[in-house]
Image (cartoon, rainbow, N blue to C red):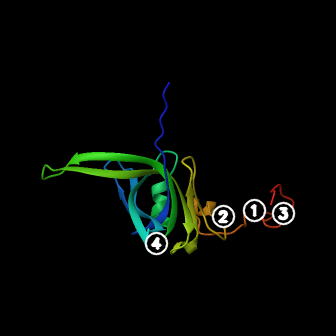
Amino acid sequence: MSRSLNKVTLIGNLGNDPEVRSTTGGNRVATFSLATSRSWNDASGTKQEKTEWHRCVVWNTKNSQLADIVERYVKKGDKLYVEGRIEYRQWTDKDNQTRYSTEINVRELIMLGGGSGARGGAEHDGESAGARSKAAAPAKAKAGAGTEDFEDFPGALADEDDDLPF
């Protein structure tokens, strides 16, 4: 049996705030452009840089509300880790011209900070949607509560007897 793999992993910065809309069926979808850059020195020693722009699409599903998380937490300039699959689409526009689009269908997204992302991050692994702040655990943010502290787990910070190897 033959196998195949379509997996894209990107780390980059948002060019604009995400656009979130609802489909006619009521599903929510977020789209944004992610910039990745690379730099090198050419043969003469001059520094060169190239930026690639990736159109990313994030859907709400039965198991996750990732588009809603993107709408709430992701802003222009944020540094993101995205993982998903690449999709190529073709359609005919109203002028009967054939159009093409390359998109990243995002299944996982982690806010990395930097840019204006100092307010924390959102993380998603395809099974559970959650948002995490650098200073707190906002499982409450996911549920819609406004408090972001450890009051649900009062001993979480005081416990020094953990099994972590570092």
- Marks 2 and 1, Cα distance to the nearest angstrom? 10 Å
Q: Residue furthest right?
A: 161
Q: Which residue is mark 3?
A: 159
In this rendering, position of residue 89 left or right of residue 163: left
Residue 77 or 65: which is nearer the viewer? 77
- The disc labelled 4 sits on which kind of residue? Gly
Q: Earlier in the sequence, mark 1 or mark 3?
A: 1
- Whether residues under marks 1 and 3 lie with C-beta atoms below 8 angstroms apart, the answer is no
- Marks 2 and 3, Cα distance to the nearest angstrom? 16 Å
Q: Earlier in the sequence, mark 1 or mark 4?
A: 4
Q: Which residue is mark 2?
A: 137
Q: Residue furthest left?
A: 95
- Marks 2 and 4, Cα distance to the nearest angstrom? 23 Å
Q: Which of the 4 image quadrants contains residue 35?
A: bottom left
Q: Which residue is mark 1?
A: 153
Q: Which of the 4 image quadrants contains residue 18?
A: bottom left
- Whether residues under marks 2 and 1 lie with C-beta atoms below 8 angstroms apart, the answer is yes
Q: Which residue is mark 4?
A: 77
Q: Where residue 2 sits in the image (x, y, percent)?
A: 48, 28
- Marks 1 and 3, Cα distance to the nearest angstrom? 11 Å
Q: Earlier in the sequence, mark 2 or mark 4?
A: 4
Q: Which of the 4 image quadrants contains residue 143?
A: bottom right
In this rendering, position of residue 161 left or right of residue 64: right
Q: Earlier in the sequence, mark 2 or mark 1?
A: 2
